[in-house]
Every structure is written in structure tokens, then in C-alpha cells.
Image: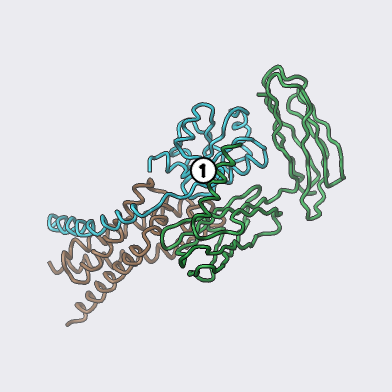
Amino acid sequence: MIIRSLLAFLAAATCARADLVWEKPVQEFHRVPDDGHLATKFAFKNTGPGTIKIKRVTSSCGCTSAKLAKNSFAPGESGEIEVKFTFGFRRGPQRKGISVTSDDKREWVLDLRVFIHEPLTLAPALVYWRVGDAADAKMVKLTTPADGTKVGVKSVTSSDPRVTATVQTVKAGGEYLVQIKPASTSAKLAAELTVTTDFPADAPRSYRIFARIK
Amino acid sequence: MIGRIVREVLLLCALAAAPAAITGYRELKLRPQTPLASGEVMLGDAQAWGDKAIWVDARPAPKFERKHIPGALSLNAETWDAQVARFLDAWDPEMRVIVYGERGDDAAPTVALRLREELKIPEVWVLHDGLDAWEGR
Amino acid sequence: MNPARIFELTLRLLLGGLLAYAGIVKVADIEQFFRDVHAFNLTRWDVSMILAVFLPWLEIVTGFALIARTFYRGAVALSGVMTVVFIGAIASAWWRGIDLTCGCFGRAVNQTDFPRHLALNGAMLAAVVWLAWLERRRA
């Protein structure tokens, strides 16, 4: 944890030393597949003493396009990179890196994170205990995205009788709470809980929660 | 006649080699290290974790089959559902997860993001420069 | 000059000019060419780098050799070899479903225009073969 914060600080410090300062180099969005694509801008300012010429802006994939209106930025000047990410068939967490290189070979990497939500989100999708831990129940929250889709949870079944699950409806079609409890944590165990739903009506999807005793 | 053609080919290659060597030297010398992003770990540090670490290959199956870091598990976006259970069987809460892809690629950061956000696995790192770092560049 | 000679001259200048131009464009941005070579996923990082540095200069030298008609037979042979290798690489990428514009996998969203690339290189190969045949006849 400390090391991670230190690394984050070092990364930020490096960016500060270089002359382009980014307003928000890491951007996170939550969308549904029907949105199709996402467009955003990464704003920056040249806080250095000299003019910066941006030689190349590339994303690591053709599904993400990155555009810059002009290349040269005088000291104190601001600019922005327009990024468009097309979802295609992708689902779940997506991360696209956009790399910006200047004429004098300096490089910055922008981080675009898009969560393309399935109809039902499981948080978390993994529950675990260590052998010998108290056999307390763990909670998994099931939610639907904000676009108004209603997903009804019909049942939660366990692949192993030693792990039981009960569902509680917080808001029908919108939010559920699954309580998962092992009979005992004296031995290692690997189980799967299957959440069956009623959505979409023509081909209802089920989701998996992983339960482990390690 | 073949002999003459071969000689001329070799001569042309030699003529090209000289400026190529100069351009190549300039290119490699002036190329700085890509910056270490947050959540990334350098190869040396990752290897120092020894068997407290589990290595995950985020690249598509054909690439994994051709070559992968010995002992690494395949877990990629395309076949996540089929592979994640196997990963969880091998994983232990005490371990650090090192996800690698290729230099400049999104596969590893995407898999790492998913492990952190969906499964809430505590220690997930992305190998800086991925398999390219392993191959010694 | 008779029409046959004019035709050979045109072909030679076109092919040589195209090769030299292609090489110059690549030398201007070696980093980008490296990414393009590596996107084929046929070579290791360091081999891709060597190719990215050497191939453009080979194209330039060969192109000029064709135009100036020096080391001519070697130049024609080299043009042929390079074009064949390139056609092979493109076909292989098409077969494996690689998106050459970004190196990702996934046929559904592949943005590379394979037919166009193959047609262009096919035409170049035809030109090379023709020049070789003309040279053979001259010998």
C-alpha cells in the first residue's frame, strides 16, 4: 500500500518535472453497451520554459482514436487531445492507453478506463476466507446500471452444499444483496454461486460469484 | 550469372547497412525509457518477489501458446469466463499478481483493472514493458 | 528509342522511384515503422527493430540502383525478394486475423485493407518479374 502510493507519487512527480501538465491524465467512465462509444478530452498545459512540439499521439488500439488540433504549444499555452473509444463487442472493464510523444522524445501515457457494464454488476464477484478465519457471512451487492434496465434476480444456487447463499431484495429489478456463508473454514474449498436472472427476456443471463477458502 | 547476381545483392545490402547502422544507433541511443505508470512494476522487482507472486499472461491464446513466461497462467479478455476459475484456484490471498502483456499494449492493464475492480483482488501489478522486458530488451 | 526500350525505362523508373520513396518515408519515422513491423507479430522485439532500421535503407539503395541501372541484376533480384516476403507477411497477417493498423486481434473490427495491400504488392511483383524477363532477354 505504501509502495503503491510512493510509486503513484513518483509517477506524478515525473509528470510535473516534464513540461506538459495534464488536468486529468486518468479518466474513468461507466457506460452500457448500447452507448456504443465514448468521447472525451484530455486537457494539458505547457508549464515549461520552451515550446513543446507534439510529434505523435497514438493509442495502442485501432478502436481508440486520438486527435490533436495542432502540434506546437508555446510556454503557458493549453491544448487538449480528443479521444474516441468505440466499444464494439467489448464488455466489462476496459483500459486504453494513449501515448503522447514530443519532438524531443519525451513521452506521457494517458489512462482511459471505461467500464462497459453488463446488465447486472456483481460487487465483488469473489468472496474468500482463509482457513481458520471466522466463518462469517460475506455480502455481494448486485446492481443494475443507471439507464433504467430492470433485471430481476430469480435465484442463487451454490455448486457446493458447504457454502450457502441467500438473496435479499433491496429494490426489485434494481438492487439485491446476496449473503454467502461457508459451513466452516476448516478446510480449503472452491465453489461457484450461480445467479439466475430474468433478463433479457428472450435469453436470460446467469452470473457467477466465486467463493474460495484458501 | 547467379554468382554476379549474388555479388550485387550482397553489395547493395552492404551499401544499405552503413546508413542503417548510423540511424539504428541514433534511434536506440536517444530512446528514453517509457515512464513507469502507477500500478506497474519493473521486471527485476517482480522477480524478487519469488514464489510469493503469481504470473498472469494477458495476451491472446495463440501468442500464449507460442511463448510465455514459464509458470504463467493464461487469463485474457477473450476467454475470461473459461479461465478465471482456474486462476482463482492457483491464486492465494498472500500472493501478488503480476499481469504481463506486450510493451505498449492494453491487454495487461485491462486484465489487471478487471482483477482489481471485479474480483477485488488486493495486490495486482502490471509488468512494465511486458514480455518484451522478459526477453531482455 | 524504340517503344520496348521506353517501356522498360518507364517500368524501371516507376518501380525504382516507388521503392526509394517508400524507403525515404520510413526512414523519416523509424519508430512508426518499427510498430508496423512488430504488428505483424512474426518477429521478436529486437529482430523487429533490426528490420525497421535496415529495410528502409535497403529500399532506398535498391530503388536508386534500379533508376541508375547500377548493380542492376542484384537490384531486380532484391526487389523481387522484398516484394515476395512482404506479400507473404500480409497474407499471413490476413490469415491470422491481425489488425495491422494496431496489431490487435479480432476479425470483426479489423481495419486493415488487405486486398488493397496485396494488390499493390502484386503489381510491384509483376513489374519486377517483367524487368527480370526483359533483362534475361537482353543477356
Task: From the image, tell me which residue sits under label 1.
Answer: B59
Q: Is residue C4 above or below residue B102?
A: below
Q: Residue at x 61, y 50 (%)?
A: A94
Q: Residue furthest front?
A: A49
Q: Secondary structure at mark 1?
A: loop
Q: Nearer the viewer, residue C23 or C9?
A: C23
- Give, as a three-letter code, the residue at label 1: Arg
Task: Please tell me how many numbered marks the rendered image carries.
Answer: 1
Q: Quadrant of the C terminus of chain A?
A: top right
Specify the colour of chain C: brown
Q: Quadrant of the N terminus of chain A?
A: top right
Q: Residue at x 42, y 55 (%)?
A: C35
Q: Quadrant of residue A205?
A: top right
- Drawn side of residue B5 relative to residue A91, left or right: left
Q: Looking at the colours in the rendered structure, which chain would you say is drawn in cyan?
A: B
Specify the colour of chain A: green
